[in-house]
Amino acid sequence: MSTHPIGFGWFLPTSGDSTNLGDPKARIAQSPEMFDEIVDAVDNGGFTYMLLPVNAFCWEATVVSSYYVARTKNLAPLIALRSGYMNPTLAAKMFATLDQMSRGRLCINLIAGINDDDTRGDGVHDSKEVRYEKMDEEVEIMKRLWAADEPIGYNGKHYQVDTIMQPSTFQKPHPPFFLGGGSEQALEISAKHSTVHLFWGDRPASIAEKIKDIRQRADKHGRADHIQFGMRLQIVCEDTEEEAWNAAYRLIDGATRFQLANMRAAQDSAEGIRRTSEANRQVWKLLEESGNDMKIHPHLWTGISTVRSGAGIAVVGNPEQVAATLQEFVDAGCSSFCLSGYTHARMARMFSEKVMPYFKGRMAETIPQAA
């Protein structure tokens, strides 16, 4: 069981929301008004951080985050560092500035991208293996810049940096790093750098075994006791179990399998993701194993993975059942839950009002602290 306080984060869908992922007409377009409603529910609902996506249809995450940091009191944006997309010195300055201006309300999400086709479309032609190599160097450079009072003299395979910069970060030694990925490279980098390793969904018993593996990897860096673990999950919660399952299946009613609602090339993206993303292959393997009802556990459902890349495993049930399922992940060693649900404002309020009370007295008041 995790000994850390239990922290909850929520997702801001800057590419749009939906009431039915299988029906384009059910899409709710992006707008400041939609974002405001979700952010208000998150900021006032007991969540400590808010994940912002970075796919081709999203509004730019750092700009949106900066805007909402100035308009909120509690939440910390979880913003992507997309390896290979930005010079690490500039990234270090941008993140440190936002961390100072927000007085420590910032988390950094380490992302290599799940699809080589999409990164090439953005003009980044590195393979995923190279992007992970760059990620490792970028994080090391940022850490050194934030800690240094003289030029850092970094000479790596991809970057050579010999400078000093201001400001340093408000959070010490630096803001928390999150990473979700299932490849060998991802696991090794997470063991070396992550504050929180995020799993994309699995059975609790499998997560417990994966945690043991990553702790062993982290031990090589003297971090076995420092790295924390979390789950990236969807939430389908209603007052009764029957209502919850009906709502879950309505979300994908009429959907074409792997017509991915959150990817630039829709169905054509699926094969590229299979080639590139081990984490997504694991999620889709669970989908294949789950049978016609798409369940891998009494309250874990793979259905959203038929129409969405990334985090498609959902916790489905009434509030007590949802809380009990999350508790199984706590027992496995997780302390952070990065959540989303359709529609996002309504489900954030539902989770805050009816599920969080089951964790009263055990909830984190701040974001995870890097060590």
Image (cartoon, rainbow, N blue to C red):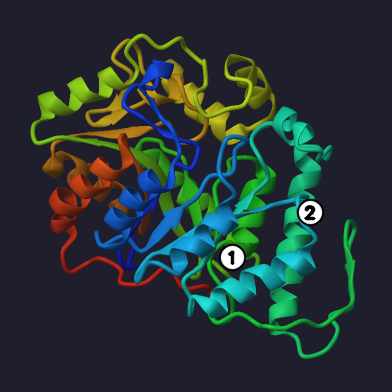
Residue wearing tag 1: 219
Q: Position of residue 192 (x, y in %)?
A: 64, 62
Considering every residue shown, the one lying at the far left of the view is 240
Number of numbered discs overlaid on the protein picture: 2
Q: Nearer the viewer, mark 1 or mark 2?
A: 2
Q: Is 104 above or below relative to 18?
A: below
What residue is shown at x 77% (from left), y 64% (from top)? 88
What amino acid is at disc 1?
Asp
Q: Is residue 208 visible?
A: no
Q: Is 238 above or below relative to 350?
A: above
Q: Is 307 above or below relative to 64?
A: above
Q: Which picture quadrant has residue 121?
A: top right
Q: Position of residue 275 (x, y in %)?
A: 69, 24
| Image side of residue 20 versus residue 200, left or right | left
Q: Is residue 157 visible?
A: yes
Quick one: SS at disc 1? helix
Q: Is 71 above or below relative to 281?
A: below
Q: Position of residue 356 (x, y in %)?
A: 19, 55
Q: Residues within 10 Å of mark 2 (few under 14, many from 20)?
A: many
What residue is shown at x 83% (from left), y 89% (from top)? 150
Residue wearing tag 2: 134
Q: Which picture quadrant has residue 316?
A: top left
Q: Nearer the viewer, residue 102 or 277?
A: 102
Q: Nearer the viewer, residue 76 or 227?
A: 76
Contact between marks 1 and 2 (CB within 8 A): the answer is: no
What residue is shown at x 77% (from left), y 41% (from top)? 129
Q: Nearer the viewer, residue 115 or 325?
A: 115
Quick one: SS at disc 2? helix
